[in-house]
Amino acid sequence: MKEQFNERLYEKRTQIIASFLVAAFIGLFNETALNMAFVQLGNDFGKDTSTIQWLTTGYLLTLGVLVPISSILMQKFTTRQLFTASLLFSIAGTLIAALSPVFEVLFVGRIVQAIGTAIILPLMTQVVLMVYPMSKRGAAMGKIGLVIVFAPAIGPTIAGFILSDLTWHYIFWICIPFLIIALLMGLKFIENVSETRPVKFHIPSILLSTIAFGGIVYGFSISGSLGTFFDAEVLVAVGVGIAALIAFSVMQMKMEQPMLNLRVFQYPMFVLGLGIVMSVMLIILSTMVMLPIYLQNVMLLTTVVAGLVLLPGGVINAFMSVVSGNLFDRFGPRVMVPIGLGFAIVALFFLRGIDAETSAYFIVALHIVLFIGISLVMMPASTNGLNQLPPALYPDGSAVMNTLQQVAGAVGTAIAVTIMSITVANATRDGGIEAAGQGAIEGIQNAITFGLVLAIIGFILSLFLKNVRQQKGM
């Protein structure tokens, strides 16, 4: 594969990447920060967990719907234009959320926030691929990996400290100064990294993409409030989503200039890396919903103490994400990814046995082990897959990778909440309100078991990984 990167922009790489990292960190921090406030939000708005969960699921759903369009956006508009638009959406959405007096306004704010994040994530990956040579991409993608995994991991911890003395509104207020700083940095340092060209928005493709990802995520999400995966509304929504996804794929393969070039799926290491990354995102998002609920509702910890329990894992993850980038440049994914998934399997195996008597220190240790494993998987698997693509497919590969990551995260969150809701409902029906507490524990255990199964699947996939090497003549 002929290497392609911008040598002039490589000299400004630190300032450019820093601007993206700050913006992306806040966007991904917002994916999970509200999880710690679910109890408070439910009390304030008089809503149950399945409804409050939509503040996270709606955010992820918006990412899943909009990120596929990013491939065209990155060809049609300059990097500076997209970066600026992303930050303006993020700032506007955060302000709406911070000022929201009712659930519906908060939900709208979350959607506007997510529009900004949907633009910044694939754009950041595209910039790294164009600015860094292949030999340096591991370390650079390690920094992105830090943001992608560390920001959602640390979100509940920071939120826990905020909620100890302040209301949930301040989770949003604290983000605004950082978003403004990122915007000012970007306006000063960011330049366009690739050539723009006159591409058109294909409305049928956009509609099919929206129906596809929206239907799938919506179907799984409403299963929580309905208490079953097999309700007619769930099956219809998921079925329509899958049908639209098939139609979208067929349409893209027949188009001369597709909205999303699905020929990226012709590259086996990209497909394998994508499958592994999706399984890990399912694990991350489902776990980061279940643990705050467990710590507050089962162990009866305050938001501060619950946040402190999750802090060491987040800090270790930040350190390991940077280290894993350098390890990737040295060893490649074939060694790192199976080891990382092995760590995740061990952690989830023991987490599935937690109950009201489990020591908080044991939770801390397992959380650390889980996120050490995840940090060894995310960046190596995704970077190795993207490295196999020719430069012309970088925007499409980045869009596909980011889209399906977010869809997986949204589906994972919804499935975890549904598993817990079904278990609690069954326990309450059979044993009355006294059994609801034990049902909640078993529901969380079952949701974590779902994560364990995904980790095992990811481990099996990782055994087929091959290190992608630069090839000449392409």
Image (spheres, rainbow, N blue to C red):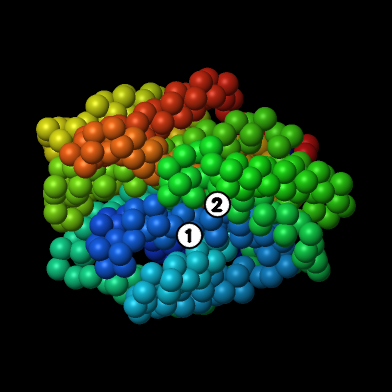
Q: Tell me whether circle 1 and circle 2 mark residues in contact (CB < 8 Å).
A: no
Q: Nearer the viewer, mark 1 or mark 2?
A: 2
Q: Residue 357: give x, y in percent of width and height.
A: 12, 32
Which image quadrant for residue 166? bottom left
Q: Residue 25: give x, y in percent of width and height.
A: 40, 59
Q: Secondary structure at mark 2?
A: helix
Q: What's the residue type where badge 1 is placed?
A: Tyr
Q: What's the residue type where badge 2 is placed?
A: Tyr
Q: Quadrant of the N terminus?
A: top right
Which image quadrant for residue 41? bottom left
| 461 on left or right of 368 | right
Look at mark 1 in the image and give the residue it sits on: 59
Q: Quadrant of the C terminus?
A: top right
Total residue callouts = 2
Tell me what residue is drawn at x 29 percent, y 61 percent. Answer: 42
Real-space CA distance between mark 1 and mark 2, rounded to the nearest whole angstrom = 12 Å
Q: Residue 74: give x, y in percent of width and height.
A: 67, 63
Q: Choose between 424 and 190: the one closer to the eye.
A: 424
Q: Is residue 277 visible?
A: no
